[in-house]
Image (spheres, grey):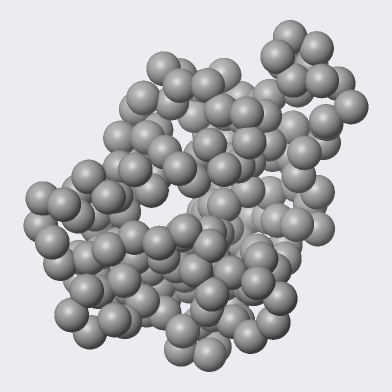
């Protein structure tokens, strides 16, 4: 039943298509921060939406009451006509720790805390409870698999090549 809601939501299907393209081309890009990942996904969505014109994508969109950045959502897909938020997406990104001193200073690691990952999950739960969006997603991209042993069994996760792991939390 819940999965049918994902399939039926056109904005989610477009997001999934863009994310799959991101996955296919991941090793052709170099990401340094979460913002690089968000920008890449946002750019892909914007290109798709220019083709169809039904949706628009925003970064750091304020959906919850409170401080600007703390309560903003990394990306939202909004229906142009109804102004409803179809999909809200939170991202976390941890670069591969093997990149220490190659192109990222050693003191930058860990970039993400596990607490930050769980806060994103809490945030998407809050978005859904408050009916702020139709679908809320938290995605944690762990480039080197540093946190993969902490991934809870009751969540969707994927292991890509070379220890790259993705943790998904979806609220419908």
Residue drawn at x 77%, y 39% as measured from the top left: 111
Position of residue 22 relative to residue 28, above or below, is below
Image quadrant containing the C terminus: bottom left
User: Quick one: which residue is furthest to the top in this view?
Assistant: 102
Q: Quadrant of residue 108?
A: top right
The residue located at (41%, 17%) in the rendering is 28
Q: Is residue 114 left or right of residue 20?
A: right
| 36 left or right, relative to 43 | right
Q: Quadrant of the N terminus?
A: bottom left
Asked whether, in this view, residue 106 is left or right of residue 73, the answer is: right
User: x and y percent of residue 25 in the render?
Assistant: 36, 25
In the image: residue 154, left or right of residue 8: right
Q: Kindly give the residue lying farthest to the bottom in the view shown.
A: 130
Is residue 1 among what the camera can see? no
- As drawn, the residue found furthest toward the right would be 107
Residue at image position (39%, 33%) is 23
Residue 55 image offset from top left, x and y in percent: 22, 65
- Of 159 and 71, the residue lying toward us: 71
Relative vertical location of residue 105 with respect to residue 171 in this rendering, above or below = above
Determine which quarter of the picture holds residue 72: bottom right
Identify which residue is drawn at 43% across, 26% down.
26
Q: Is residue 100 above or below residue 26?
A: above
Count of numbered circles on the image? 0
Q: Position of residue 109 (x, y in %)?
A: 83, 31
Q: Residue 84: image x %, image y %?
A: 31, 82
């Amino acid at each position: 039943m819940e999965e049918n809601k994902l399939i039926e939501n056109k904005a989610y299907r477009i997001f999934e298509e863009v994310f799959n393209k991101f996955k296919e081309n991941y090793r052709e890009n170099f990401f340094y921060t979460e913002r690089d990942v968000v920008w890449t996904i946002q750019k892909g969505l914007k290109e798709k939406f220019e083709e169809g014109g039904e949706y628009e994508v925003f970064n750091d969109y304020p959906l919850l009451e409170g401080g600007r950045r703390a309560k903003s959502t990394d990306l939202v897909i909004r229906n142009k006509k109804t102004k409803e938020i179809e999909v809200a997406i939170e991202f976390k990104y941890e670069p591969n720790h093997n990149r220490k001193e190659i192109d990222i200073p050693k003191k930058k690691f860990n970039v993400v805390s596990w607490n930050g990952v769980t806060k994103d999950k809490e945030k998407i739960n809050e978005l859904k409870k408050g009916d702020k969006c139709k679908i809320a997603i938290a995605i944690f991209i762990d480039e080197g698999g540093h946190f993969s042993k902490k991934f809870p069994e009751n969540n969707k996760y994927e292991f890509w090549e070379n220890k790259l792991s993705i943790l998904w939390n979806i609220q419908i």
